Amino acid sequence: MSDYEPVLLANVGKANSHALSVYMAGGGYRTLRRVLQEKTPDEVMTMVRASGLRGRGGAGFPTGMKWSFLPKGHPGPIYMCVNADESEPGTFSNRVLMECDPHQVLEGAILSCYATRAATAYIYLRHEYPLALGRMQAAIGECYAAGFLGRKILRHDFSLDAYIHRGAAAYVCGEETGLIESLEGKRAWPRIKPPFPAVEGLFRKPTVVNNVETLACVTHILDRGVDWFRSIGTVPVPYDPRDPGSLGPKLYCVSGHVNRPGCYEGSLGLPCREVIERFGGGVWKGRRAKAVIPGGLSTGLLSADELDTLLDFNGPVRAGCLGLGTAGVVVLDETYSMIDFLHNCCRFFAHESCGQCTPCREGTHWALSMVERIKAGRGRLKDLDLLLEIADSIGILPGTTICGLADGAAWPIKNAIRKFRGEFEDHIRRTNPQGYSVAEPVPAMTASSDWWSVVS
Ligand SMILES: Cc1cc2nc3c(=O)[nH]c(=O)nc-3n(C[C@H](O)[C@H](O)[C@H](O)COP(=O)(O)O)c2cc1C
Ligand code: SF4
């Protein structure tokens, strides 16, 4: 690892790193120029597929395979949606890329549009990122002026227009079909799949949705080659022919109770402990970690004895988490209450559920109600099993919801209670020794809760 050379963050820290002149001084857009001269779209797609690049937006789906689902010989239009909504709690790597190196994002997006034959790219940008919005807009302007966007790019027979669409400020807007609905001017309600966006997406046309970091990787694959990309990260496990491995560079967002919160680059598959120690400077105030969110809130929790878990696409799953997610690593120190953790999680997901699916709409609110009650000292031991029952029955994985928000709501509950049950039981025994139950409405659902009165 010591000889790892950052590529995604190579420009970050340079003066005016967001300007076209600085990007080009570092070799920017030379890959676009070369690829347009030397490679066909199919060749680019083949390279991306061979690299093993997997989506950085959360699900880790192989990018080249996703592109290959686009209908062959389609007369168009084909759309590219750049998912810059970045709403997963604990995740800010897209923000760093767009604020500090917007041209890296654009070059990757342009090359990806060339490969997929998309003639329009929409950058769906998180509403709460005004600096990224300004920098991306300015970068798009510079690209049009320099001939990297617009008609006949670099005099090649390839044209592309790029637009920014400011997000509607909800977590579910980042779900790819919610994003598409929102782009179409509607409420961001995720669609039932199939059809998948590659077949029927934006305006019912074939559409690719990719994360900002995924697209940024594409330039480096085409610049440095497939072998370079495959030499970084965790190789496929030999006993599973369907495992594509976890290859390439990765941005790790480190936050919570650490000494040096920030966005860092390393190879995919670093041990969680190394990410916390080497990048985050260790747990703050000389304390120890009690738990770590490995990849954004929806991935769940690693306990202190699971910190040697490799942060690749398989590691967190083996440790009982939902997945690697976004590699947004959030550290909770030994003094932090798991009841408070779960309360915050449940508030978030109950608030963000779009309400289309009954198990998600009701389940996230029931879970919040119960955790509110436990926190308020009126919990019962059997509430813990009820919470687990809710968590085990909502989501795409149990097959009861349209989108993965409900899985993301379920995993923190499952992990918190299964891995820290003793703390919950102690709290309940201490605060409600008689174990009585109440029938009146719980605070979360009434105007007496600060949070509820704010949002209602
Ligand atoms: C509730 C929810 C929120 C999501 N939010 C984001 C997001 O903010 N950014 C993102 O890139 N992907 C997000 N995703 C994943 C997208 O649906 C999609 O898988 C991703 O954009 C595909 O890009 P990739 O293949 O490059 O990772 C979210 C998924 C769900 C279920
Ligand atoms: S799972 Fe939840 S957020 Fe997703 S579509 Fe259903 S109700 Fe909406």
Image (cartoon, helix red, strand yellow):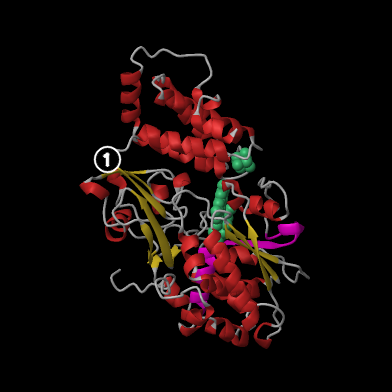
Between 115 and 140, the one nearer to me in the picture = 140
Where is residue 279? Give x, y as percent.
Answer: 31, 60
| Quadrant assignment for ligand 2 | top right
Q: What element does badge 1 sit on?
A: loop
Q: Residue 13's x, y, as percent?
A: 39, 71
Viewer-side residue, 266 vs 148: 148
Relative depth, front residue between 367 and 387: 367
Magenta range? 198-222
Across and down, in percent, residue 230 comes to 43, 71
Identified at 55% across, 68% down, the residue is 135
Residue 318 in the figure: left or right of residue 365: left
Magenta-drawn stretch contains 215: yes
Q: For residue 239, which quarter of the picture?
A: bottom left
Residue 333 seen in the current view: yes
**In the image: residue 17, left or right of residue 152:** left
Is 154 part of what is drawn in magenta?
no
Q: Amino acid at mark 1?
A: Glu
Residue drawn at (44%, 39%) of the image = 412
Q: Residue furthest left?
A: 286
Q: Residue, x 47% and y 28% (percent of image)?
A: 387
| Residue 332 located left or right of residue 241 | left
The image shows residue 246, relative to residue 15, as above or below, that is: above
Please state the horizontal and vertical placement of residue 40, each as a whole percent of the image.
64, 81
Q: Which residue is mark 1?
A: 334
Q: Quadrant of residue 133?
A: bottom right
**Residue 397 shows in this picture:** no
